[in-house]
Amino acid sequence: MTSPRLMLLDSASLYFRAFFGVPDERDDLTTPPVNAIRGFLDFIATLVRDHRPTHLVACWDNDWRPQFRVDAIPSYKTHRVAGGSTVVEEEVPDDLAVQVPIIEAALAALGICRLGADGYEADDAIGTLVARYRGTMPIDVVTGDRDLFQLVDDAAGVRVLYTARGGVRSPDVVDQDYLRERYAVGSGPQYADLAVLRGDPSDGLPGVAGIGEKTAAKLIAAYGSLVGLRAAVDGGDPAIKGAQRRNLEAGSAYLDVGPLVVTVAPDAPVPEVDPILPASIADLREVSRLASDYGLASPMNRVIDALGLGGD
């Protein structure tokens, strides 16, 4: 009997990767593009075949820029706002935007669970599902986003399959040893604290001036956590001095709110469902229609074969 294992997909991370990594092979550009759909389905087939999860959830961005994070740090993801307009929409290439609803339809037809929560990002859905299933089975989080390293927990069997470098076929397996070797922090929560201090220009997070990744890691290692570091600053620890002390004191207001933005929610209102892999195709007629209308027979069949549902 196969041991249970839950796999959580950071879906947008994967379909963006597919869109930019899989060639658009259309001969007629008046027909809809399907490269992101094909790539996303192939990613699922590869992940299921290579890692044998028994449970799978495609986690969704119901809100890519949640208001509670914008309220905390107004610059959060401002560079991704389409056209810089007052109507806040995510800047997504048109040829990708038209494919996302078809990915949704394909997941539904195959019977693969897709979950999100209104007002929250996919990261928060992932964090909530990790909290919900922690300790009941090992959990693999598949993403190209380092932010989710904060969920790594060897004792609970939570690891990240990080696709940014080796892709889906050869992801970095991120556990606590990986965090120690690459970032000099020993746990997921310490990585989150490092991320707050370091900041992330790609997400509009300023960090603390003068404190890069290596300095942040040393400070977290020395004081155990961001809370411990701030207590040491406030308490006048003589080991924190000069420009470093000035920068940490000047960054106090940012450090008050940074964790609210960086830390994924463990309690988003994600629906309660059973995310077990489908035992049969949910809607064979819809699978056939999507395969015919969009030329998806091959990637659909690869997913069906990986799931052990036969080649119908």
Image (cartoon, rainbow, N blue to C red):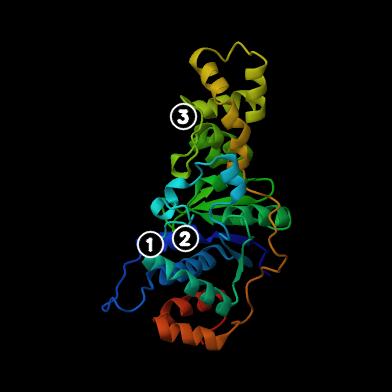
Task: Kindly indicate whether the residue at mark 2 contacts the one at mark 1 (C-beta within 8 angstroms).
Answer: no
Which amino acid lies under the numbered mark 2 shown in the image of this protein? Leu
Disc number placed over residue 212 in the picture, else none: 3
Q: CA–CA distance between discs 2 and 3? A: 28 Å
Nearer mark to the viewer, of 1 and 2? 1
Residue 36 x/y as whole percent: 41, 68
Whether residue 274 sits left or right of residue 78 in the image: it is right
- First in sequence: mark 1 or mark 2? 2
Which amino acid lies under the numbered mark 3 shown in the image of this protein? Gly
The residue at the far top in this view is 238
With respect to residue 116, does 146 lie above or below? above
Which amino acid lies under the numbered mark 1 shown in the image of this protein? Pro
With respect to residue 105, does 270 lie above or below? above
Q: CA–CA distance between discs 1 and 2? A: 15 Å
Badge 2 element: helix
User: Image point 51% across, 54% down: which residue?
Assistant: 143
Residue 7 x/y as whole percent: 60, 61
Foreground of the two, 123 or 180: 123
Q: Quadrant of residue 240?
A: top right
Whether residue 136 sits left or right of residue 66 in the image: it is right
Q: Quadrant of residue 263?
A: top right
Nearer mark to the viewer, of 3 and 1? 1
Residue 99 x/y as whole percent: 43, 71
Task: Kindly indicate whether the residue at mark 1 contacts the one at mark 3 (C-beta within 8 angstroms).
Answer: no
Would you name the residue on which mark 1 appears? 93
The residue at the far front in this view is 86
